[in-house]
Image: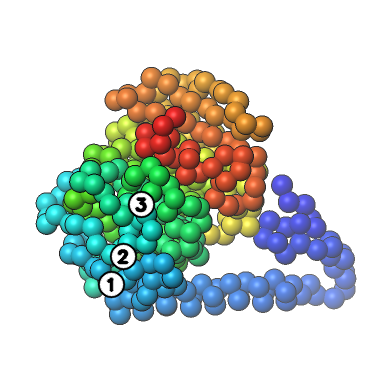
Amino acid sequence: MAGPADSPFGLGGPEPAPPDPVAPERPNRTVLWVLAAAVGLLAVAVLALVAVLVLGGGGGDNDGAARPGASSATTGPTTTATGDGPGASGDAIRPGGQVQGEVRLEERSVQQGVLQRPYLVISPADPGGERLPAVMVLHGLTFDRNSMAATADWRAAVARDRFVAVFPQGVLDSWNAGPCCPPSNLAGTDDVGYLTAVAEEVGRRTDVDPSRRFLTGFSNGGIMTYTLACAQPTLFAAVAPMAGSNVSGCAPPSPVSLLHVHGDPDPTVPYDGSLTASRVLSSAPFPDVPTSVGAWAAADRCEPDPVVAEGPPGVRTRTWRNCADGARVELVTHPGNGHTWPKSPVEGIDLALRFFGIRPS
């Protein structure tokens, strides 16, 4: 917990002197300026988001052109973001884009009202006629699809493990996961609709097995992973939020396999639900992670007491067993390494792919 000299908003300093009993108490000008600046920035962000929605922009830092290494030359058929659920009808989509080494890079988009929203696809250069699993990866707040694809070695994983990696794009690099996060949640952006449309379009690819679609995400993307899994429990075979939390407290209406990976401590999305500066981004508190994952296991009708296993130094895995419909629920806690994609002593891609059954255990 923060003390007087270390406020939860990073504005800590020496304790103020007691007020003069004669002079009237004046408001703290520094606090007023900080609050005014925060309100101003928030207003600008909301106005920018409205402009993007009205004018049909794509969101993100580089929506007009992919970053080096990504192809923007191929855009396939678009679909509305209202979808009819898994396996929605539509034309089959063949891999396009540009081959770079062992992988193919492809920029695509779906239409959501007046907004054309992009997503990046990384797939094996030669699918060999196979129907491959697909993993959708949601970026964190202030990240975009391209920076998320570069956060870990997704290209090498795609080439080695032969799956299709999909990186959607949040409007202004944020996701509306209910209570979190601005500016998308303040504008009511329909990210559930957009991500459902992307997943359905991916399911129509000739190189994808629609029964093996999986979902993971980091931070705001991890929070969005929970929201989407609750809203579309049959769309993905399993989900794996990283350094996020179930801020909305939603429960899946039918069992959904879940792997939650979290550092302890995490200064941004707190493992124990304590107050951090990032609390200002959410209208609801961040929940205690073990309790929250336990609630998900209860919704999946698992046995109430998890089996605990120790792995590499400081890594602990809780596994809830005998869940309904063959679902699995695991919580992997690793030593805190800041609020970053887990790389040591555990690696996020490796954990997710093993849980998804894409990489051998």
Q: Please report contact status of discs 2 and 1: CB closer than 8 Å, yes or no.
A: yes
The residue shown at (48%, 78%) is 44
Of residue 43 and residue 84, the one placed in the foreground of this image is 84
Q: How many marks?
A: 3
Element class at badge 3: strand
**Residue at label 1?**
73
Of residue 24 and residue 262, the one placed in the foreground of this image is 262
The residue shown at (30%, 43%) is 133
State the separation of the CA atoms marked 3 and 2.
15 Å
Above or below, comparing residue 281 to residue 228 in the picture = below
Residue 99 location, x and y as percent?
Answer: 32, 62
The residue shown at (63%, 57%) is 277
Element class at badge 2: strand
Q: Nearer the viewer, mark 3 or mark 2?
A: 2
State the separation of the CA atoms marked 2 and 1.
8 Å
Choose top left, top right, bottom left or bottom right for residue 77. Answer: bottom left
Q: Is residue 6 left or right of residue 66?
A: right
Q: Alpha-carbon neighbours of circle 2 within 10 Å: few (<14), some, or many (≥20)?
A: some
Q: Is residue 38 left or right of residue 65?
A: right
Q: Alpha-carbon neighbours of circle 3 within 10 Å: few (<14), some, or many (≥20)?
A: many
Q: Earlier in the sequence, mark 3 or mark 2?
A: 2
Choose top left, top right, bottom left or bottom right for residue 332. Answer: top right
The residue shown at (38%, 42%) is 161
Q: Quadrant of the C terminus?
A: top left
Give the label on residue 165, or none.
3
Element class at badge 1: loop
Q: Nearer the viewer, mark 2 or mark 1?
A: 2
**Residue at label 2?**
98
Residue 82 location, x and y as percent?
Answer: 20, 57
Amino acid residing under circle 2: Gln
Q: Alpha-carbon neighbours of circle 1 within 10 Å: few (<14), some, or many (≥20)?
A: some
Residue 275 location, x and y as percent?
Answer: 63, 50
